[in-house]
Image (spheres, rainbow, N blue to C red):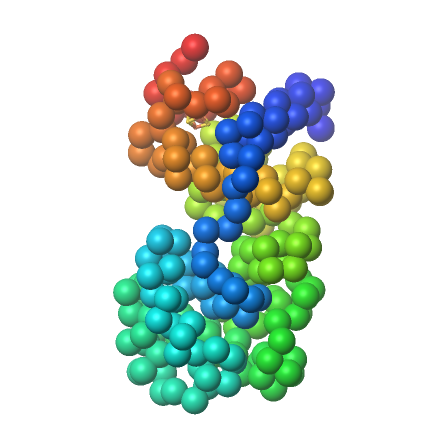
């Protein structure tokens, strides 16, 4: 890593900490299994919408078996408003089956095991490991982290996996969990896709994005 990049990354981390010292996962959950379900539901959907749906969902379905005891149609109706509800139903029931049959209804705590669950890719696995178990296995790369990584020049890659690989190289491991929360918060608050509010952005001096809306 070049010295320039190293210094810039250090500054980005410092500024994000100042702006979002308490950033945390915004998906409501009370255990690892609920977080796994909420994260599967959050694909192509806002966390706010997922939180509305899971209010009733988590009252009705408390353990993996509960998801297996209903028809796909019934579960589809229960999660319909999160979008892509047919695929999400297949993923949730597939994951519930594996958890029930192979893990005694517990969520496993390794990346490899989580990736074996239907519908679970690295993003979901990182969310669960980081937030339910406090384990730093990688950096969560969602749409916000992707956009901000590009704008801040932390990665030029297109796929989430390659972006994560770049981030892991430049962000210290002990900061991986908080860093992704802070990036997601910043993406929602100011660095939005269409109209980034650069004049209000603490990171403006370390950001060379081509679509900046303000230049100091
Ligand atoms: S300066 Fe603008 S583009 Fe750069 S991080 Fe801030 S809001 Fe995003």
Asked whether residue 158 is in view, the answer is: yes
- Residue 117, placed above or below residue 72: above
Quarter of the figure that contains the N terminus: top right
User: Which corner quadrant of the figure contains ligand 1?
Assistant: top left
In the picture, measured across the screen, residue 206 lies left or right of residue 1, that is left
Horizontal and vertical percent position of residue 22: 54, 40
Q: Is residue 24 above or below residue 27?
A: above
Residue 174 occupies which quadrant of the picture?
A: top right
- Kindly identify the residue that appears in the image at 35 percent across and 20 percent down: 213
Q: Outermost residue toward the top?
A: 216
- Is 75 placed above or below 24 here? below
> Residue at the spot x=39%, y=39% of the render?
188
Residue 189's x, y, as percent?
39, 35
Horizontal and vertical percent position of residue 60:
39, 78
Which residue is painted at 41% across and 13% down in the image?
A: 215
Looking at the image, is 166 positioned above or below residue 113?
Answer: above
Quarter where residue 122 is shown: bottom right
Q: Quadrant of the C terminus?
A: top left
Q: Nearer the viewer, residue 56 or 163?
A: 56
Q: Looking at the picture, how far across and down is residue 16, in whole percent?
A: 55, 30
Residue 36 in view in this figure: no
Q: How many marks?
A: 0
């Amino acid at each position: 890593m070049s010295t320039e990049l190293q210094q810039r990354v250090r500054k980005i981390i410092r500024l994000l900490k100042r702006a979002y010292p308490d950033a945390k996962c915004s998906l409501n959950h009370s255990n690892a299994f609920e977080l796994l379900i909420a994260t599967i539901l959050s694909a192509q959907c806002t966390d706010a919408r997922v939180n509305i749906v899971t209010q009733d969902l988590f009252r009705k379905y408390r353990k993996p078996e509960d998801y297996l005891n209903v028809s796909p149609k019934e579960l589809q109706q229960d999660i319909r408003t999160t979008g892509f509800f047919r695929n999400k139903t297949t993923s949730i029931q597939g994951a519930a089956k594996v958890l029930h049959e192979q893990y005694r209804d517990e969520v496993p705590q390794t990346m490899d095991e989580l990736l074996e669950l239907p519908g679970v890719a690295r993003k979901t696995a990182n969310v669960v490991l980081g937030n339910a178990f406090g384990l730093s296995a990688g950096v969560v790369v969602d749409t916000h982290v992707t956009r901000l990584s590009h704008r801040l020049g932390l990665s030029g890659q297109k796929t989430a996996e390659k972006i994560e690989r770049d981030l892991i190289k430049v962000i210290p491991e002990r900061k991986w969990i908080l860093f992704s929360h802070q990036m997601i918060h910043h993406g929602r608050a100011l660095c939005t896709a269409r109209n980034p509010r650069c004049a209000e952005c603490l990171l403006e001096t370390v950001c060379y994005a081509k679509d900046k809306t303000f230049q100091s």
